[in-house]
Image (cartoon, rainbow, N blue to C red):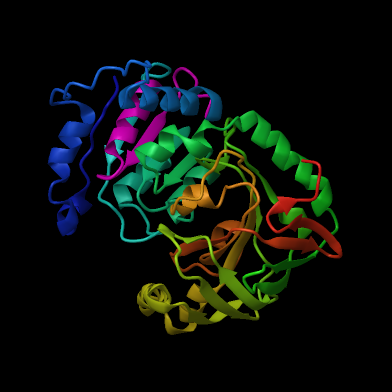
């Protein structure tokens, strides 16, 4: 029998979630839904129909959920409608489905409540449409180690779930990312430049490129974002130096003013860019205060570098989709432990460059946002 709701003890600790019970009730359908607008004369599908179609694609194409599998859907008060759509699609495949609404986190990488983390470990499939990312949490890493396949959807909105990157052909994206593999072989020096002023160099272990963020997550111990479509790697710790200009988006903000990061030995040592730079310093500073003194500077680690590979992804101010846009690249700051690094700091935030030029050793593969390769 499908269970749809499970309260967590953390609910009472979040003033912003005082209306959680009301939201849960509306999410799981204990109240009658408002009448939906009829189709337009052009037979434009309703929002519910679009949600159902995207959820069906996630369940059948991306996750290949099979009858009898244990499935956990984790959402929060901002993503309840998406969680419900996924639940309705999933119960057509399996009766062993749990939908849980947890309190909204405070930032990317914050651990979910302990009851949620424990539930994750008992599943074969975890779907996590949440405001803030669970990807780089111990809870997700443990669930993957225990055999779950996991799709996280940080910052997902109804528009993102039904349009843009989610409307891509994920089988084609899988092929496109696979075609990059030969160009990465035996190349260890990465140089990124842009007309905005980026000029940064770092080393990678070419064997560690991640080429499976393609939207197809159908085997145990696989982890993907949705919408998917990127190739990424952890920069070798301590090797990155130069100036990095983030001109596309930062976290959930479409930038009007670029952010300038000065990088020395793999760490951000200065941030410039008006109010948003001040906000970045404050946010990372608050996380650092909670760490042991010897670990505090690790919040400024350049944790991840990657290419966007999704031709349908849009640049709209949500990094979940922005970083997948074909022809962009991104850098993330903070926690790199999920990629095998030593910075376990509980925050991980990406910024996107819109039209970069990229070299691997002496071979240029991207020029002003256009791939020079046959992919």
Residue at x 70% of width, y 59% of height: 368
Where does the image place residue 191, in percent across and percent down from the top left? 75, 68
Q: Which residues are magenta?
A: 63-90
Q: Would you say 144 lies left or right of 263 here?
A: left
In which quadrant of the rendered view does residue 290 lie?
Answer: bottom left
Identify which residue, 331 or 243, lies in the foreground.
Answer: 243
Q: Residue furthest front?
A: 41
Q: Is residue 314 visible?
A: yes
Magenta highlight on residue 66 = yes
Q: Would you say 198 lies left or right of 35 here?
A: right
Where does the image place residue 33, in percent across and percent down from the top left? 17, 24
Identify which residue, 94 or 15, lies in the foreground.
Answer: 15
In which quadrant of the rendered view does residue 93 lie?
Answer: top left
> Compared with residue 263, is residue 56 higher up or lower down, i.e. above or below?
above
Q: Would you say 283 lies left or right of 265 here?
A: left
Magenta highlight on residue 371 = no
Quadrant showing the C terminus = top right
Q: How many marks?
A: 0
> Compared with residue 159, is residue 3 higher up or lower down, i.e. above or below?
above
Residue at x 67% of width, y 35% of height: 174
Where does the image place residue 35, in percent across and percent down from the top left? 17, 21
> Compared with residue 29, is residue 133 higher up or lower down, i.e. above or below?
below
Residue at x 41% of width, y 30% of height: 71
Q: Is residue 123 visible?
A: no
Residue at x 35% of width, y 76% of height: 286
Quadrant showing the N terminus = top left
């Amino acid at each position: 029998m499908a269970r749809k709701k499970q309260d967590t003890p953390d609910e009472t600790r979040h003033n912003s979630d005082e209306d959680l019970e009301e939201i849960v009730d509306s999410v799981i359908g204990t109240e009658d839904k408002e009448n939906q607008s009829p189709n337009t004369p052009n037979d434009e599908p309703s929002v519910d129909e679009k949600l159902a179609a995207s959820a069906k694609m996630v369940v059948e194409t991306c996750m290949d959920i099979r009858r009898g599998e244990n499935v956990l859907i984790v959402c929060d008060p901002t993503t309840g409608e998406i969680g419900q759509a996924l639940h309705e699609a999933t119960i057509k495949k399996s009766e062993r489905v749990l939908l849980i609404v947890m309190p909204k986190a405070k930032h990317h990488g914050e651990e979910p409540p302990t009851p949620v983390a424990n539930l994750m470990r008992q599943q074969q499939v975890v779907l996590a449409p949440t405001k803030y990312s669970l990807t780089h949490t111990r809870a997700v890493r443990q669930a993957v180690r225990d055999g779950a396949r996991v799709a996280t959807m940080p910052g997902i909105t109804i528009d993102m779930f039904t349009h843009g990157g989610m409307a891509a052909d994920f089988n084609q994206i899988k092929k496109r990312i696979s075609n990059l593999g030969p160009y990465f072989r035996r190349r260890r020096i990465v140089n990124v430049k842009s007309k905005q002023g980026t000029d940064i160099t770092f080393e990678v272990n070419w064997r560690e490129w991640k080429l499976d963020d393609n939207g197809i997550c159908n085997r145990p111990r696989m982890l993907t974002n949705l919408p998917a479509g990127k190739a990424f790697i952890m920069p070798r710790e301590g090797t990155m130096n130069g100036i990095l200009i983030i001109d596309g988006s930062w976290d959930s903000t479409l930038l009007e003013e670029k952010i300038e990061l000065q990088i020395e030995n793999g760490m951000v040592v200065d941030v410039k860019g008006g109010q948003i730079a001040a906000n970045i310093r404050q946010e990372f500073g608050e996380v650092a205060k909670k760490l042991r003194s010897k670990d505090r500077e690790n919040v400024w680690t350049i944790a991840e570098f990657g290419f966007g590979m999704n031709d349908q992804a849009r640049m709209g101010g949500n990094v979940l989709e922005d970083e997948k846009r074909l022809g962009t690249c991104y850098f993330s700051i903070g926690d790199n432990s999920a990629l095998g690094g030593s910075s376990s700091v509980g925050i991980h935030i990406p910024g996107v460059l819109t039209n970069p030029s990229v070299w691997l050793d002496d071979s240029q593969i991207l020029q002003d946002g256009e791939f020079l390769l046959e992919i």
